[in-house]
Amino acid sequence: MKELVCKTSNTHQYPILIEKGIKDRIASMKTLFAPYHKVVIITDKNVAKKYLADMERQVRAAGPKVYSIVIPAGEESKCMGQVSDIYDELVKCNVTRKDAILTLGGGVVGDLGGFCAATYLRGIDFIQVPTSLLAQVDSSVGGKVGIDLDAGKNLVGAFHQPEAVIIDPLFLDTLDDHYLMDGMGEVIKYGCIKSQGLFVKLMSYAYHEDLLDDMEEIVAKCCAIKKDVVEADEHEQGLRRILNFGHTVGHVVETFYKYKKYSHGQGVAIGMAQITKKTEAEGITQVGTYDQIIALLENYGLPTKLPKMPLEKVQEILFTDKKFENNALHICALEKVGRAQIVKIQKDQAIELFR
Ligand code: GLY
């Protein structure tokens, strides 16, 4: 088992436990569950079918009473209406500050359930059990929780760190290829921004089976990078911005196609390629980096070409990006594979990223 500890303040730290098969050992985590009278599992319909009954049994065996809330699968659930429904359920279950939420699912479940945990009774504890690759390597660690508004993704949220993140790479064995590749967009991001070694390793896999065999190590490497960054800059005032490599362009692509044509990982892949094309042309990034990134993304079937979108519409979406501050955007650019820096772009120049 790989065990990391994420220490975000003098008073809060939490374990990130990564091991194949750990999902079947939750019943033995009596110390983790000891503080709670009740645990409310939040999950979605797809995950519930496969894993909910067993998770309920295990958490109950660990000590607390168990309740479950099952939401519809998909990004549409990350909304205020769903939050309100969950609050109603938490009231019905008589949840107090001595209780906790356990999120069992992908990024939507983790972000939404975490947001409910951050806000219900001014904040209760929560434990993340991410089941998608994207959630395992990125959204479950670091405490960003939130929901979408019609005006844009993740516009309402909080920083609320979990009490533990329990990651079982075996969940990925039953994940559709599409979702696995979606997560690979974020995995490749970690190689680009912080680890040439990971980047090179990812180049070496010819078969999915080999990739899945090594998943414990790959997920642990990504989580270790993320935890270091989050510990240094929990509230995204500086360094944490490197985790958004490719995300500004990706956000526009995802939004322009209404989250239907491109997944998050695909949007990030296009964004990483597009930004690197630009920064390499400007001499910020070492020549050849763009070709390396394209080759790796293509290896995992991820898109690299910016689709044609009218610039007026791009501008409209871009300006809703919550990362704009004082008419400037801080974006992550690579010096070379494995080394990132933050570049400031004025609002009137930002559209150049899309030409
Ligand atoms: N997903 C980027 C971050 O957690 O900062």
Image: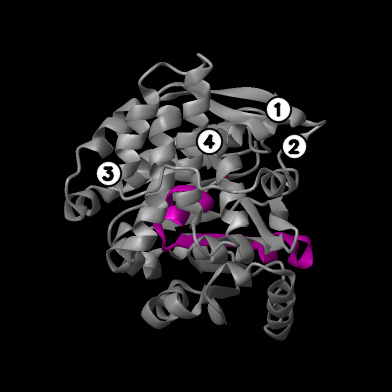
Work out whether residue 128 or residue 138 is closer to the camera in this orientation and state it. Answer: 138
Work out whether residue 43 or residue 348 is closer to the camera in this orientation and state it. Answer: 348
Give the Cα separation between the discs numbered 2 and 4.
15 Å
Q: Earlier in the sequence, mark 4 or mark 3?
A: 4
Q: Residues within 10 Å of mark 2 (few under 14, many from 20)?
A: some
Give the Cα separation between the discs numbered 2 and 3.
33 Å
**Element class at badge 2:** strand
Q: Earlier in the sequence, mark 1 or mark 2?
A: 2
Give the Cα separation between the discs numbered 4 and 3.
19 Å
| Amino acid on which disc 3 is placed | Asn
Q: Earlier in the sequence, mark 2 or mark 3?
A: 3
Q: Decide whether residue 25 is among the magenta residues.
A: no
Front disc: 4 or 3:
3
Coloration of the structure image: one colour
- Residue behind mark 4: 245
Tell me whether the residue at label 1 lies in contact with that at label 4, contact meaning CB atoms closer than 8 angstroms.
no
Residue 324 is tagged as 2
**Element class at badge 1:** helix
| Amino acid on which disc 2 is placed | Phe
Residue 124 visible within the image: no
Q: Earlier in the sequence, mark 1 or mark 4?
A: 4
Q: Residue at x 40, y 47 (%)?
A: 303
- Residue behind mark 1: 349
- Residue behind mark 3: 299
Q: Residue at x 39, y 66 (%)?
A: 26
Q: Quadrant of residue 181?
A: bottom left
Q: Quadrant of residue 180?
A: bottom left
Furthest residue in direction bottom, as rendered = 92
Q: Is mark 3 within 8 Å of ligand 1?
A: no
Front disc: 1 or 4:
1
